[in-house]
Image (cartoon, helix red, strand yellow):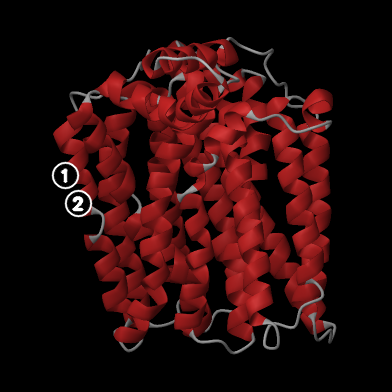
Amino acid sequence: MIKTIILTLKPYKDIRMLRILLLGAISGFPWVLIASSLSLWLKEEGLSRSTIGWAGLIFGVYAFNYLWAPIIDRIQIPFLTKKLGHRRGWIVLMQIIILLSLIIWSLINPTENLALLISVGLIIAIASATQDITVDALRIEQINENEGKSMAAGAAMAVVGWWTGYKLGGVIALFTAEFFENMGITDYWQVTFLILGILIILMNIGLMFVHEPIETDRQIKQKETDRVIESKLGSKNIITNFIAYITGTIGGPIISFFKKNGFSIAVGILGFVFLFKIGEAFLGRMSIIFYKEIGFSKGEIAIYSKGLGWITTVVFTLLGGIMAMRAGTIKTMFFAGGLMALTNLLFAILAWTGKSELLFAIAVIADDITAAFATVAFVAFISLLVDRTYTATQYALLASIGTAGRTTLASSSGALVDWLNGDWGTFFVLTTIMVIPSLICLWLIRNKVKIGEK
C-alpha cells in the first residue's frame, strides 16, 4: 500500500513540476486584474450588475486566441527570442504589455473614462490570452509525449499554479485595496494596481529559471506540411510559397486534429470541451458580486473565497491529479462534472438563507474541490490530445473552445440575474442544470477518444 502511494506521488517530485507551477501562476494572475479586481472596482463605483457582466465580454478574446496561435508557433520575437528562447520571449513581451496597462489603469477615473478603462482591460485580456498560448505550449513541452502520468501530474501542478496566481493574487489585491481605502485614499484601486505591477516583475524574474527545451523538429515538420501543400498547388513561385505557408500555419493544426481522431469523434470532443464549464463560468462571473450584495466585506471575501479557497484548491488539485493518474482523465471528469452540478446548489442555499460565514466557507470549499478535480482532468485531457508539431495551436484551439462557453455565454450572467429580479437562488439552480449537456457529450465519446494514458 505504502509502495503504491509512493509510486503514485513520484511524478510530483520531478523538478519540472516546479517550473510548471510557476508557469501556471503566470497564467492565472491576469485574471485577478480583469475578473475580481475590475468587477469589484466597477461595483464600488456604482455600476450596475448588467454593465459589469457585459464588461466581461473582454474575456471573449480567450475564446479566440487560437486564431493567432499559429503565429506564436512560428514567428520569433526580435531580440527576445534570441536572448530568452522562443516561448519565453513571447511570455516576457506579453508581461510587459500587461505591466504598462496597469500603469494606465492607475491614472484612470472609471466613471469619467469607462470606455478607456474597458479598452485597457481588453488589452490586458488580449495579452493574457496570447501569453496563455505560449505558457501552455512551454508547459506541455516540458514533458515527453509518452509520459502520460507525468502529463497528469503536470496538469495538476499547472492548475495549482494557476489558482495560486489567481487566488493569492486576489488576496493581495483585495487586502491592499482595503488597506488603502481604510487609509482614506480615494483612488485606492488605482494605487493597488501599481502594487500588483510589482508582482508581474517578480514573476518575470522567476521565469528565467524555467528551462525551455532545446529546439525540436517542430519547424522541420511544419515546413514538410508547407511542401505538401505546395505540391497540391502545382507551380512553385513566391505566391504559391506564401499561400502554402499561410495555409500550413492555419490549416495544418486543424487537419492534424481531425485526421488523428476522425470527424465524428473530433466533433464530439469539441462539443464536450465547449460545454463542460459553462455552469461554473456563470457562477464564477457573478460570485464576487453576490458575496458583496449578501453582505460580505472585501476582507471576508479575501479570507473565505481567496485564501481558504486557495488552500482547498491546492490540496484537491493534487488529489485530482492522483485520481487522473489512477482512474484516468475521463472517469475523473465524469466524477468532477457530477460534483460541480451538486455544489452549485450550495450557493442557492446560501442565497435563500442569507449571510452565513459557515455556509459561505462550506460552499467555497465544495466549489473549489470540484473545480480542482474538473480542471486538472480537463487540462490533462486536452494536453494528451495535442500533436507536438502544433503544440501551441492545437492546445490553444481546444482551450479557447472551452473558454468560448465560459466567456461569451457567461457574459450574460449579470443580465440573467437582473432578469430574475435579483433571485440569486434560482440563478444558481440554473447553473447546476447547465452542467448536464457536457456530460452527455462525454458519455458518447468516452470509449473512442485516442489519448495515451500510460
Can you give x and y, in whole percent of width and height, for residue 29 in the image? Answer: 65, 51
Q: Amino acid at mark 2?
A: Pro
Q: Camera-side residue: 370 or 52?
A: 52
| Left or right of residue 217: residue 450 | left
Residue pointed to by mark 2? 437
CA distance separating discs 2 and 1: 5 Å
Q: Is residue 226 above or below residue 266?
A: above
The answer to whether residue 323 of the structure is visible from this angle is no
Residue at x-position 16% and y-position 44%: 440
| Left or right of residue 51: residue 107 | right
Callout 2–callout 1 Cβ contact below 8 Å:
yes
**Quadrant of the frame with the N terminus:** top left
Residue 136 is tagged as none
**Quadrant of the frame with the C terminus:** top left
| Left or right of residue 52: residue 21 | right
Can you give x and y, in whole percent of width and height, for residue 9 in the image? Answer: 51, 20
Dot 1 crowding, Cα within 10 Å, few <14, some 14–19, many 20+: some
Dot 2 crowding, Cα within 10 Å, few <14, some 14–19, many 20+: some
Q: Is residue 395 above or below residue 297?
A: above
Q: Is residue 197 above or below residue 273?
A: below
The answer to whether residue 201 of the structure is visible from this angle is yes
Residue at x-position 29% and y-position 20%: 259
Q: Amino acid at mark 1?
A: Ile
Residue pointed to by mark 1? 440
Q: Camera-side residue: 48 or 92?
A: 92
Numbered label tally: 2
Q: Camera-side residue: 6 or 12?
A: 12
